[in-house]
């Protein structure tokens, strides 16, 4: 299989991993006073009333609450444990005094009176981006089902794999490849940290919009560095842009470009042993095969957090490294490094 085909297959595998446990079809139209069924369209089958509510609220809420410290919409278990049966948010039989309703209505106390921020929930219902009315949520709270007998027990069927966030991709990849901010921006001016960052050409820098100093592009000379971060799914609180928790074509394309450019930077960086730990560019598979194999396995462990099986090491060596080494050892190690970054084990957490 050619290297481009392997890259495509890896992207497809990642997408499958990330969507295997998610509901990506039409969400149910919750209708009380009926049999509790869906709208008749093709949908993920909810496992009960709580799940119907979870799936119906997800389009408005999961953008902020699929991951992070309040991942209420990561699974039904997370929804019930973290939100439904926590009386800080939902008071059984008493919707008017439930914080969830107050947040949806924009009347909650504290710093965040409204959820989702930026637009009233009723407006989302009006323009069709949400199908569940606040009155239906109130009815659900009035008739709230009893908590499962073993609510606190872990659910072995729960979907626990997620894609790395854009922040995690940028920060961890810099660390894994032995790169720092100074590898991407001009530092010749002694006062460079207090002036606009001049991004060095050809380095494909990715700049999170919320990073200090400055607001968004104020301190970055290349606006594409912020655009790449958003393409990876990064949010920007300063511009009211939510994170994208899916892994679509834009994220895949940006990660491919990022992996190739950053791996090249890591290989070319003098004294950097992040990628070339047991070999130099003078070592080839013909001259020093043991060192090449040792370095390949070490790089696999560094990037993916587990040692490769013999079959995986053989495939990476024969189908990625050897064909590219025919052009240059530099290109061979850039290819291996980039392939590992696009591996489902690196993309997911």
Image (cartoon, grey):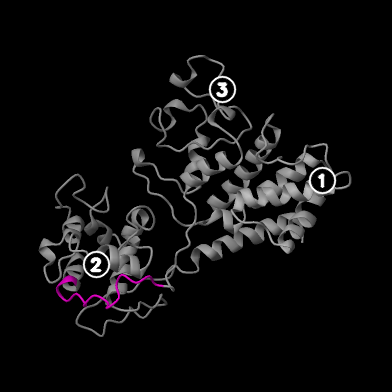
* Residue position for label 3: 186
Instruction: Count neighbours of disc 2 (C-alpha within 10 A) and say few if under 14, some if 14 to 19, many if 20 or more.
Output: many
Instruction: Count neighbours of disc 3 (C-alpha within 10 A) and say few if under 14, some if 14 to 19, many if 20 or more.
Output: some
First to last magenta residue range: 141-155
Q: Could you say where residue 243 lies in the image, as x and y percent from the top left?
A: 41, 49
Query: Which is nearer the N-term, disc 3 or disc 2?
Result: 2
Asked where in the image residue 159 lies, by quadrant, the reply is: bottom left
Contact check, label 2 and label 1, Cβ < 8 Å? no
At a point 42% along the width and 27% down the height, the residue shown is 218
Q: Could you say where residue 52 lies in the image, as x and y percent from the top left?
A: 30, 74
At a point 29% along the width and 68% down the height, the residue shown is 80
Q: Could you say where residue 17 lies in the image, as x and y percent from the top left?
A: 54, 64
In the image, taking residue 206 as reference, residue 302 lies left or right, namely right
At a point 89% along the width and 47% down the height, the residue shown is 286
Q: Could you say where residue 40 lies in the image, as x and y percent from the top left?
A: 36, 81
Magenta stretch secondary structure, dominant:
loop
User: How many angstroms separate mark 3 from mark 1 (CA)?
Assistant: 32 Å
* Residue position for label 1: 325
Quarter placement of the N terminus: bottom right
User: How many angstroms separate mark 2 from mark 1 (CA)?
Assistant: 56 Å
Query: Which is nearer the N-term, disc 2 or disc 1?
Result: 2
Contact check, label 3 and label 1, Cβ < 8 Å? no
* Residue position for label 2: 84
Residue 131 visible? The answer is no
């Amino acid at each position: 299989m050619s290297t481009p085909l392997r890259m495509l297959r890896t992207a497809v595998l990642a997408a499958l991993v990330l969507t295997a446990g998610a509901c990506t079809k039409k969400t149910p139209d919750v209708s009380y006073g009926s049999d509790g069924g869906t709208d008749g369209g093709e949908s993920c089958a909810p496992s009960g009333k709580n799940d119907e509510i979870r799936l119906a609220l997800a389009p408005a809420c999961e953008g902020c609450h699929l991951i992070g410290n309040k991942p209420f919409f990561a699974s039904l278990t997370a929804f019930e444990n973290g939100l439904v049966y926590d009386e800080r948010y939902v008071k059984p039989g008493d919707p008017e005094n439930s914080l969830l309703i107050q947040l949806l209505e924009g009347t909650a106390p504290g710093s965040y009176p409204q959820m989702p921020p930026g637009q009233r929930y009723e407006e989302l219902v009006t323009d069709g981006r949400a199908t569940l009315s606040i009155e239906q949520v109130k009815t659900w709270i009035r008739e709230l089902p009893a908590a499962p007998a073993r609510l606190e027990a872990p659910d072995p069927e729960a979907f626990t794999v997620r894609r790395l966030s854009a922040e995690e991709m940028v920060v961890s990849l810099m660390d894994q490849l032995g790169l720092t901010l100074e590898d991407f921006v001009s530092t010749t001016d002694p006062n460079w940290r207090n002036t606009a960052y001049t991004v060095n050409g050809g380095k494909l820098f990715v700049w999170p919009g919320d990073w200090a100093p400055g607001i968004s592009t104020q301190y970055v000379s290349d606006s594409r560095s912020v655009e790449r971060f958003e393409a990876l799914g990064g949010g920007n609180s300063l511009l009211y842009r939510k994170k994208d928790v899916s892994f679509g074509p834009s994220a895949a394309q940006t990660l491919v470009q990022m992996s190739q450019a950053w791996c090249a930077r890591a290989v070319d960086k003098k004294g950097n042993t992040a990628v070339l730990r047991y070999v130099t560019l003078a070592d080839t598979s013909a001259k020093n095969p043991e060192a090449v194999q040792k370095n390949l396995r070490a790089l696999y462990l560094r990037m993916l957090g587990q040692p490769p099986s013999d079959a995986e090491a053989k495939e990476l060596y024969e189908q990625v490294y050897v064909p590219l080494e025919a052009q240059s050892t530099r290109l061979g190690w850039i290819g291996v490094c980039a392939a590992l970054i696009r591996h489902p084990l690196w993309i997911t957490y």
